[in-house]
Image (cartoon, rainbow, N blue to C red):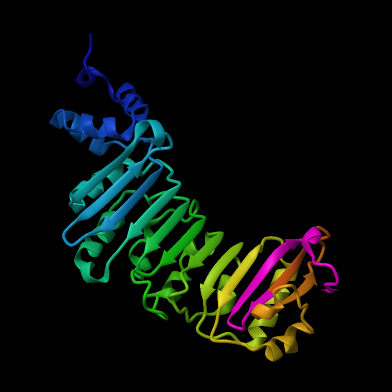
């Protein structure tokens, strides 16, 4: 009976692609020949989710496959950049559903090591969803496959501090990964200083802007009522009172939560009979633009056209 080492590359590669990632990592430890073959090959694995936490001197990594309930979850602590390179190289041909990266500003050296690992992969890492805890988004986002990435979620390391700076927001907006994504969520502890119009291609947006003018609100409303893709645009700002909002949106609808400072406006969406645009102001500091089913329009609410 032939051993693994006697097989040609094609059947051996097929065996690896039909093995779970834990088995592949175990096979890699069998001998130098198998290790070299695995390291030099590019094959699909069953990995679906990777969570990387940057520690004082290394990485903690959680890996999960779609069959996590039966295969379990792989957890490693104290990995070096060399260890991390191995697991990321294994998934280069695979499509992850989630990549989660947790950084720390006090561990910039290890974060730079992580960036080097991503930068030196032979192809961009493929994931549909990037969730990052930390402001150094430019050390991760440019090395992801811009054709597959659909959702970007960025939260700060520290939730106790408001109005934190998101490093490199202007450069991030020029990346294809940003331009091609469909959903963007930037935690409200970040204060974003950026051109409002750069966010209008998303289906869903959550963000806190440094400043928002009445002209920008008009532009957002016009973009929404003519769009075929926008679903939600929710943001906070430094405060626009009800009188200012009435200047651009007209008389608001006073719904059942009016006593909580909630004002609403309804606008028809062009060439669409099934949905309307609802604009909701919450105490003047949060605005929510939502594509709403016509069946959910409150009684007595006026839909403007």
In the picture provided, is 170 more to the left or to the right than 275? left
Residue 107: percent from left, percent from top: 21, 67
The residue at the point 28 percent across, 49 percent down is: 61
The image shows a total of numbered marks equal to 0
Whether residue 36 is visible to the viewer of this picture, yes or no, is yes
28 w.r.t. 3: above or below: below
Asked whether 300 falls inside the magenta stretch, the response is: yes
Find the residue positioned furthest to the left. Answer: 32
Residue stretch rendered in magenta on the structure: 280-305
Residue 248: percent from left, percent from top: 73, 86
Q: Residue 106, located in which quarter of the rendered image?
A: bottom left
In the picture provided, is 252 more to the left or to the right than 239? right
Residue 11: percent from left, percent from top: 33, 21
Asked whether 95 falls inside the magenta stretch, the response is: no
270 w.r.t. 3: above or below: below
Residue 75 vs residue 175, the one in the foreground: 75
Whether residue 200 is visible to the viewer of this picture, yes or no, is no
239 w.r.t. 185: above or below: below
Residue 303 vs residue 284, the one in the foreground: 284
Residue 77: percent from left, percent from top: 21, 49
In the picture provided, is 120 more to the left or to the right than 236? left
The residue at the point 77 percent across, 72 percent down is: 266
Indicate the quadrant containing the N terminus: top left, top right, bottom left or bottom right: top left
The residue at the point 37 percent across, 78 percent down is: 161
Indicate the quadrant containing the C terminus: top left, top right, bottom left or bottom right: bottom right
Find the residue positioned furthest to the top. Answer: 1
The residue at the point 29 percent across, 36 percent down is: 41
Q: Residue 59, located in which quarter of the rendered image?
A: bottom left
Residue 301 vs residue 176, the one in the foreground: 301
């Amino acid at each position: 009976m032939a051993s693994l080492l006697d097989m040609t590359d094609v059947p051996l590669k097929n065996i690896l692609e039909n093995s779970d990632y834990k088995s592949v990592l175990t096979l890699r430890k069998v001998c130098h020949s198998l290790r070299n073959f695995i390291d030099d090959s590019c094959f699909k694995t069953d990995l679906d989710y990777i969570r990387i936490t940057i520690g004082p001197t290394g990485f903690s990594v959680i890996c999960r496959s779609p069959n996590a309930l039966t295969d379990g979850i792989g957890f490693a602590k104290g990995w070096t950049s060399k260890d991390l390179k191995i697991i990321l190289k294994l998934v280069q041909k695979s499509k992850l559903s989630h990549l989660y990266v947790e950084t720390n500003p006090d561990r910039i050296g290890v974060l730079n090591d992580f960036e080097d690992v991503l930068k030196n992969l032979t192809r961009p890492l493929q994931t549909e969803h990037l969730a990052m805890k930390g402001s150094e988004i430019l050390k991760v986002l440019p090395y992801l496959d811009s054709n597959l990435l659909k959702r970007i979620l960025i939260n700060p390391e520290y939730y106790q501090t408001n109005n934190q700076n998101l490093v490199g927001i202007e450069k991030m907006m020029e990346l294809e990964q940003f331009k091609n994504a469909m959903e963007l969520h930037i935690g409200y502890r970040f204060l974003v200083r950026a051109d409002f119009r750069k966010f209008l291609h998303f289906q869903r947006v959550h963000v806190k802007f440094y400043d928002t003018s009445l002209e920008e609100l008009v532009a957002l409303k016009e973009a929404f009522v003519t769009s075929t893709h926008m679903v939600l645009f929710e943001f906070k700002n430094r405060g626009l009172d009800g009188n200012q909002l009435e200047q651009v949106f007209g008389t608001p609808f006073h719904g059942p939560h009016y006593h909580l400072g909630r004002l609403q406006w309804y606008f028809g969406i062009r060439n669409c009979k099934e949905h309307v645009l609802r604009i909701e102001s919450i105490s003047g500091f949060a605005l929510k633009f939502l594509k709403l089913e016509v069946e959910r329009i409150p009684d007595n609410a006026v839909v403007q056209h």
